[in-house]
Amino acid sequence: MTQDSAALCPLCGATADEAILDRTAVPVFQNVLYATPQEAEAAATGCLAIRACPACGFVHNAAFDPDCALYDANYENNQSHSAVFSRHIDASAAAVLKAVQPGQAVLEVGCGQGYFLTRLAQAAPSGTPLVGFDPAWRGGDPPAPGIEIHARLFDRAAAESLGRPIGAVVTRHVIEHVPDPVAFLGAIRAALPGTHPVDLFIETPCVRWILDNGVVQDFFYEHCSYFTAETLDAALDRSGFETVSVDHVFGGQYLWAHARASGVAGAETAASGDDLRASVATFRSRHAHALTGWHDTLAAARQKGRVALWGGGAKGVTFAAVFDPSHTLIDCIVDINPGKQNRFTPLTAHPVLSPECRSIARNWHPGGDEPPVPR
């Protein structure tokens, strides 16, 4: 990617030159943890150059290099261990199933290890075909009866090989990882049959929520595309989908879009960047305050004893990297996902422990030879 092309908005092609945030040497993957501190410290890095398009309001990382972000079976972002998030997943599954007629298949593009498909299987009528596509699928038996998962990208050949009508396609927390969202959505549209309407459901973080709330840990390398409701609507329209609705869900953190591939899409949406400028200004102010405020808060807490950070997902890993890059203020990160426990965060090598380890962590120095293990 050249410097000139990186400055162009991937959504509308205008010059996206309104700077929101710049960071160097950030972890390429927040959801890949490491077996040893040495491996963690040697993790691949990239840069953030978060830019907003003044013409349409789309936000992206102009420094993103897709050749650096190659997903494989080591990627672990399962959030279903959280009861709150599980309820959100079940509500999303119910919304998808409402759009499906008996005998029609539900496809998930970017299904990971099949967690959402499993929730669909629990709620779907018996015999509903559930099929997932993800190059990061680790293989083995599907997570529930009636589920098929293919370790490949979804395209027309994959759709035709199903041999059954498609009722709905869902892609959750995938499009923000894609540098060209219109091409991504266009590829899904091109793969779908023209014989009957197919519903598309998308969930992705809302960049306006990030900006308005000053959530500095929500900008990281894995996410190269950031949407408002307006820019997600525009991306759908430009990809051949007719937008039915775009709603804010999960306390406003996420956008939930419902669109339809039904022949000819509606009129193209003209998004505007004007109403995002106030949010960008708010974020810049809060970001500067957060850098000082959180460092002082952590330093004061560290004077009183050990400090643990709750949550070893992308937000927690980014928080540790931004506010404790030298691993001197935060002793450990606690996460309820067993797939993350007893591993180390990229670059900073913070150990990720189970909640049961928290009493041990208070007596364990981060410079020790081995992480504590549950007893």
Image: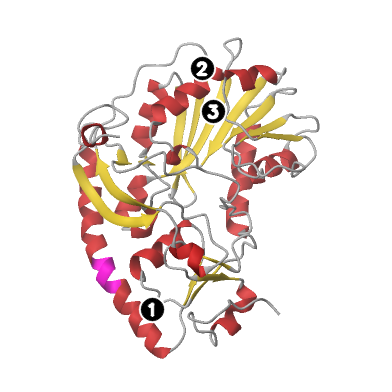
* Residue 300, image x, y percentages: 34, 84
User: Is residue 368 shown above or below 32?
Assistant: below
In this figure, which residue is indicated by the disc labeled 2?
190
* Residue 325, image x, y percentages: 36, 69
In this figure, which residue is indicated by the disc labeled 1?
328
Q: Residues within 10 Å of mark 3 (few under 14, many from 20)?
A: many
Looking at the rendering, the stretch of residues picked out in magenta corresponds to 289-293
Regarding residue 345, the answer to whether it shows in the image is: no
Instruction: Kindly indicate the quadrant of the structure image that contains residue 214.
Output: bottom left
Q: Is residue 43 magenta?
A: no
Callout 2 amino acid: Ala
Please report the residue visible at 64 percent of the width from the left and 35 percent of the height from the top. Answer: 151
Q: Is residue 305 left or right of residue 291?
A: right
In this figure, which residue is indicated by the disc labeled 3?
200
Q: Which mark is drawn over residue 359?
A: none
Q: CA distance from mark 1 to mark 2?
A: 51 Å
User: Is residue 370 shown above or below 91?
Assistant: below
- Does the residue at mark 2 contact the one at mark 3 (Cβ under 8 Å)? no
* Residue 221, image x, y percentages: 39, 49
For the rendered model, the colour scheme is secondary structure
For marks 1 and 3, the one nearer the N-term is 3
